[in-house]
Amino acid sequence: MISRRAFLKSGGLAMLSIGVGGVPAFAIRAAHAGKHTGLYKKNKILVCIFQRGAMDGLMAVPPFTDNYFKTARPNLFMNADSKGSLMDLDGRFGLHPGFKSFASLFQSKQLAIVHGMGSPNTTRSHFDAQDYMESGTPFNKGTTSGWLNRAVGLMGHEGSPFRAVSLTTSLPRSLYGDNPSIAISNLADFGLQLRGAKTANLTAQTFEELYDQTSDELLKEAGKESFEAIKLLKQSDIKNYKPDGNANYPNSPLGRALKQIAQLIKMDVGMEVAFAESGGWDTHFNQGTDKGIFARNAEDLSNSIVAFWNDLGAWQDNVTVMTMTEFGRTVKQNGTGGTDHGRASCLFVLGNDVKGGQVHGQVKTLAIENLADGRDLEVTTDFRSIFSEVADRHLQLNDDKILFPDWQGNPIGIMKS
């Protein structure tokens, strides 16, 4: 069901706020704008996946020819040898075997990697680093909105109540803000609940009755497509959904979330931003190589994304998928067979408008003098330069001063012109 925190405003109030006569504010805005688009066109859709816990980018995409790296990780190092422990991407970087399902997407130039990415803020706190990345303001803890919520506000057109959806139990920091967004933990138990300043826990049916009772025909018309979308979702046979393209989703939180995102996309309820999470990346001990904690997480992430991509079929041209993680891990392994909190990591971007088949970004030769604090991979690509380019090009946004306040960087060239 939808979380009780499903509709939020500035992290605490009703996202779907109540307007005149009990009519939701988004309907009033649509009415005054004179916009009624009918049931939804095929929108561009950005799907973001947060890898919580700080993924070890040096294990995901290791510089396997680096001699310092070999000595720094005597029990974690893997090579791209004849045994095929790593997939050799470009003669310098390899792909961890847990991500082997990504190989065909990289080779077909649909999947790109950005290495050496991270935050300019040097905190090693998971909570703070995630907060900074999701707010998009790495030196301002007082920001009340998330960067994805601001992206929704920059789209320049009215949208569905399902425009921004998180398949999580509560709304993530990325979607906090003034623009409507929703958290759904399970579509099969769907029951829309709205929370407002004057009305609490009203079902969709109750709100529809409010529309029926209003004398303002313009407001009725503005809300019509919203309820059509809600009805469509409630009436769909969610539990018996059969994926296309022989897609085989893992039975994991991420696999189930991406499966439901694919359902929402193909149901055409007007979704334009989607969010999901992958946990367990805090590998302080027993990290493993081709087996172990990291490998299991890598397999789940890549298999879930590949299943989602295959399931989309003809929708692939409309969708871009981007992963993110709060920071990376130390270059050296620790005494318990793991890695500790570091600086830079890497991320994956998948889509038909991505410059795939490349490892983007800059990673210097690993030597003490090139490491942040003498121990970590240096951040050479600010996460905002990636997020802004992907969002700008894919969602056709054009105001980075709003999307990422206090940032004046440049795109890295990961998206096609």
Image (cartoon, helix red, strand yellow):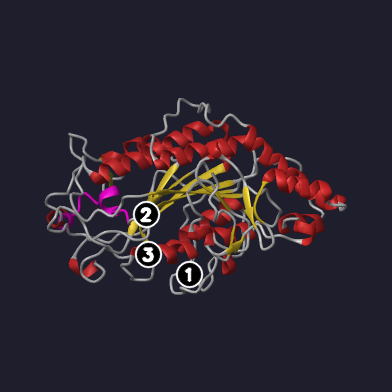
Query: Which residue corresponds to mark 3?
Result: 127
The amino acid beneath tag 1 is Thr
Marks 1 and 2: in contact by CB < 8 Å? no
Q: Is residue 300 visible?
A: yes
Q: Nearer the viewer, mark 2 or mark 1?
A: 2
Residue 394 percent coordinates (x, y): 57, 50
Mark 3 and mark 2 lie on one chain; the one further toward the N terminus is 2
Residue ID at (53%, 34%):
312
Residue 310 percent coordinates (x, y): 47, 32
Indicate the quadrant containing the N terminus: top left, top right, bottom left or bottom right: top right
> Disc count in the image?
3
Left or right: where does residue 94 sit relative to residue 41?
Answer: left
Left or right: where does residue 197 sit relative to residue 347?
Answer: right
Q: Secondary structure at mark 1?
A: loop
Residue 186 percent coordinates (x, y): 51, 41
Give whichever of 272, 143 is nearer the camera: 143
Marks 3 and 1: in contact by CB < 8 Å? no
Marks 2 and 3: in contact by CB < 8 Å? no
Q: Secondary structure at mark 3?
A: helix
Q: Is residue 114 visible?
A: no
Q: Secondary structure at mark 2?
A: loop
Dividing the picture into quadrants, the one containing residue 313 is: top right
Query: Which residue corresponds to mark 2?
Result: 52
Residue 332 percent coordinates (x, y): 17, 59
Dividing the picture into quadrants, the one containing residue 104 is: top left
